[in-house]
Image (tube, grey):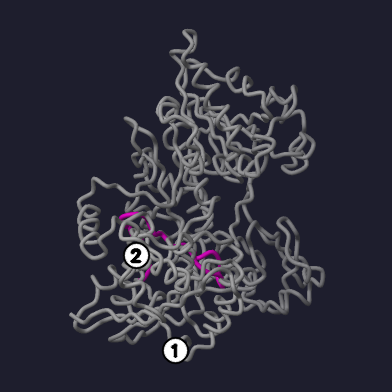
Amino acid sequence: MKKLKSIAKVIFLLLTMPLALNVSAQSDSLEVHQINGKSYYIHFVEKGQSLYFIHQKYNVPLEIIKAENPSVEDGLSVGEKIFIPIKKDLSIIATVDGNYINHEVQKLQTLYSIAKLYQVTQQEIIAANPEISEGLKEGQIIKIPVSGLKNTNTTIVESVNPTYKTHVVKQGETIYSLSKFYHTTVDSILLVNGGLTQGLKIGEKINIPIKINPSELANSNQALNVPINKIQTSVNNTRVNRKSEYAIGLLLPFYLEENAEMVQHRSAVEEKTIYPKARFAIEFYNGFLMALDSISTDKISFKVYVYDTKGSDSTLIYTILQQPEFKKLDLIVGPLDYDNFNDVADFALQHHIPLISPVKQSNKTLLGNEYVFKAVPSKSTSIKQICTLVVDSFKTENLLAIEYEKAKEKALVDFYVKTYNNQLLNYKDTSVYSSIKTLKINYNIADVVSNLKIDKNNVIFVPATEQTFITNLFNFLSTTLNKREYQDYRVTLIGLEEWMKFENIDLEYFQQLNVHYCTEKFIDYNDSTTALFVKNYIKKTETYPLQNAFFGFDLAYYFGNNLVKNGSLFSETSLEPFKGMSIQFDFVKTGVESGYENMSSTIVRFYDYTLESVTH
């Protein structure tokens, strides 16, 4: 086996020292829901909306809305479900009027798809409708010139006989998201799949009724947050020539000079200590090298170029980018600093080199650059995962969300409510499921207790990291549940991973309140693969591996294997979902010309005073 090559200034130190566009806006359901034999739309009330607004939006008389929803007489609440009776047939009919066909623009239709439908050019449609230069609007009537038509039917009815496509369910997909992607309805998918009474299961094959040409689908405006193989990419993914050696650049803050100074002043007892700011880089590096070494063969090897970025020195990054070997890299990992990462991203785009961020970054880094990969999921992605858990396991329980007025994360409450409502639309009769009640809290935590119910599990979502507030909340809830009149109450507290840093909160509270949270990294130390890695790591470095060592291994193993097996990260067989020892990867392309975000994370809970995964 070829030995892994690693190149760096002062590399002896590392070897002797063990080392978007994320669209998340609420979209009301225009799917038909059958409830007690009647057909409805379901509208979820958003902040600032009035009953008059809903009446205008759906063009349904106020009296009818009130008759179907008696509770609206008492006012509207954010997240409340309003049932809108359907009053007309939604068939799409285009009729001839003189020299033109009058076409009503449907939801998500583009100028391109309309031109393809009528077999005319986009320029001909624009010439007949100068006003559409500002864009199309749903419900707008536009003229299609008859003279340009290649067939001369006097009446055109958009009613394409459906065909069926087999779809393999991937993690994170819902019936609602699939209906939007394939331009069909939730009810249609349920109809051709026997109702899907058990919901969707990863790996399951389901039928999708298709009413449009797949080529039109790729040109619609809906290419957002769908599986990687569903979005066209401009990256050349035709024929890839595999290499015998792949070059990878690591841009991480090793602080070599600072570590060298520490080496000179260590005592024998402190022999294994390292410069604190370099800990992430060195641990990650060790795991990274072990992974590449494990997948290297006599025919394929890796050369790793190590660049010490120190902190956020942009001048140093500029110098690194000028190195002659940098343009020839097959993969770049880092840097960690946001501004520096964007500079390297520009370079990666220019030279067509995949670039991975091993830390959380804004989704802005993905816009317009399909060579960028975010390995660590965003906070919004974690909230979506939490909503999936709530819909799957708690949708009939008492659902509460605490919006702490001083929390910088309070906007996550609205996102949580909207995402839950959207996922709930996968079910036919949503009237039997619970709505989320939002509680705006300052320090009046007693309001939370007054909303608890004895006959249901009280599932409380609290997106806040202000330590004093969280500590007071834990104390108050624990004290309350210890009282005789509340001993039969059940509580499930869903929070943020940052709570684990609060050393003043006793572990007993986490257990009693059945705390759940979402984490991008989780290590099962009882797993045999994990145990073997720990053994090999200790043997190689004489230190115990921490989380970043596992992460470095998983990331290198995943991307390294993609290069070895496919020769590229952009082939049709690249980037399949992967479960590592510390992290799961399921990359989604966030736009036609944008990068990839890892959409997989793990939900954990406290059970028997230890953490366990509840993500299937």
Is 9 situated left or right of 378 in this image? left
Q: Amino acid at mark 1?
A: Glu
Indicate the position of residue 42 as horizontal and vertical percent values.
61, 38
Indicate the position of residue 132 as horizontal and vertical percent values.
77, 68
Front one among 303 and 12: 12
Front one among 387 and 579: 579
Residue denoted by label 2: 19
Residue, x 31% and y 65% (percent of image)?
Answer: 18
Q: Quadrant of residue 216?
A: bottom right
Is 396 situated left or right of 405 in this image? left
Q: Amino acid at mark 2?
A: Leu
Q: Give, as a single range, the part of the protein colored magenta.
A: 574-596
Q: Main secondary structure of the magenta part?
A: loop
Disc 2 element: loop
Residue denoted by label 1: 325
Disc 1 element: loop
Using the image, tell me which numbered label, if any, was put on residue 357.
none
- Where 3 falls versus 504 (above or below)? below
Front one among 196 and 339: 339
